Image (tube, rainbow, N blue to C red):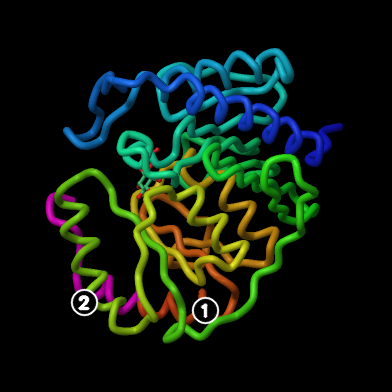
């Protein structure tokens, strides 16, 4: 009650810009890999943790009654019904290799972000601190993109038939999942213009909003990867769902303008049926 989603989006943008500055300006020359997570290639750098600590502290000052859940250690249970879901560096592998395609993603959500499919974003921002790209969206307020401090432009998706569509995707860190994803892609690749694996799900979803990708799908996303980008895409007119047409969730996130979304949904459903379940699951 009494929450203005436009104000939440402004807060999301402010703190995401700050964290973006932190991870670029204070990046150590010898970036140590602090630890690995699900596999040896799923790394967390010291800067992932520092960026998240910054977001936790700042959002705590600005919105003390809200909850907080991030990709890295540390969180907070709130009382307001709003939880901030953040990815302190989305595209950690790009960050490690100094490929300028990583972002800070900050979203305000309602519902329980620990329940797969049981939450919704109401405001969010995604910031690429290298290119200066800033995306923001709030419920009913549209989706906006600007570079650095320039006046943001409102985004609206357009349709592309699947056979002409540039299709973004991404891969998990787990070997069985990757084998399954590769098998599904053998059914998708002949049906689309081409495929890109750009390395940041948050930016991929924002690219759906600004048309620099036509359609996107990935299995295995976590709430922090998709929370802000999901809203940026939908507020620009995209459809973002799982394969059954419900909220995007761990087993599939599919995004695109309505027509190409429907075409891709059919192709993916057939591919998933042909490939069968992931081994080990
Ligand atoms: C990853 C990126 C990547 C996607 C992975 C995510 P991280 O997030 O978004 O593009 O394919 O599924 O885990 O680990 O860099 O925050």
Which numbered disc, 1 or 2, marks the residue that appears first in the sequence? 1
Residue that mark 2 sits on = 274
The residue sitting at 57% across, 55% down in the picture is 206
Q: Is mark 2 within 8 Å of ligand 1?
A: no
Say above or below: 42 vs 139. Answer: above
Between 99 and 102, the residue placed more toward the observer is: 99
Q: What kind of element bears circle 1?
A: helix
Residue 167 x, y percent position in the rendering: 41, 70
Between 119 and 261, the residue placed more toward the observer is: 261
The residue sitting at 23% across, 27% down in the picture is 36
Q: Which mark is residue 113?
A: none
Whether the magenta-drawn stretch holds residue 58 is answered as no
Name of the residue lying farthest toward the right: 2
Residue 203 x, y percent position in the rendering: 51, 51
Quadrant including the N terminus: top right
Direction from residue 63 to residue 213 in the image, left or right? left
State ligand 1's quadrant.
top left
Say above or below: 196 vs 264. Answer: above
């Amino acid at each position: 009650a009494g929450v203005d989603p436009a104000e939440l989006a402004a807060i999301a943008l402010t703190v995401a810009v700050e964290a973006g500055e932190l991870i670029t300006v204070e990046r150590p020359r010898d970036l140590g890999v602090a630890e690995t997570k699900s596999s040896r290639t799923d790394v967390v750098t010291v800067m992932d943790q520092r960026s998240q600590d910054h977001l936790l502290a700042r959002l705590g000052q600005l919105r003390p009654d809200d909850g907080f859940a991030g990709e890295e250690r540390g969180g907070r249970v709130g009382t307001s019904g709003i939880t901030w879901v953040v990815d302190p560096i989305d595209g950690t592998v790009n960050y490690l290799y100094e490929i300028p395609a990583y972002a800070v993603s900050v979203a305000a959500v309602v519902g329980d972000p620990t329940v797969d499919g049981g939450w919704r974003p109401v405001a969010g921002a995604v910031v690429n601190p290298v290119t200066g790209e800033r995306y923001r969206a709030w419920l009913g307020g549209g989706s906006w993109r600007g570079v650095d401090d320039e006046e943001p432009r409102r985004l609206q998706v357009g349709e592309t038939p699947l056979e002409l569509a540039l299709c973004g995707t991404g891969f998990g860190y787990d070997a069985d999942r990757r084998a399954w994803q590769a098998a599904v892609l053998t059914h998708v690749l002949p049906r689309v213009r081409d495929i890109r694996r750009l390395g940041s799900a948050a930016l991929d979803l924002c690219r759906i909003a600004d048309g620099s990708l036509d359609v996107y799908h990935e299995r295995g996303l976590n709430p922090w990867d998709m929370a802000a980008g999901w809203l940026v895409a939908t507020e620009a007119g995209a459809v973002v769902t799982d394969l059954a047409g419900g909220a995007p969730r761990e087993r599939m996130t599919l995004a695109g303008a309505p027509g190409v979304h429907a075409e891709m949904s059919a192709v993916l459903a057939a591919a998933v049926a042909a490939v069968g379940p992931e081994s080990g699951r």
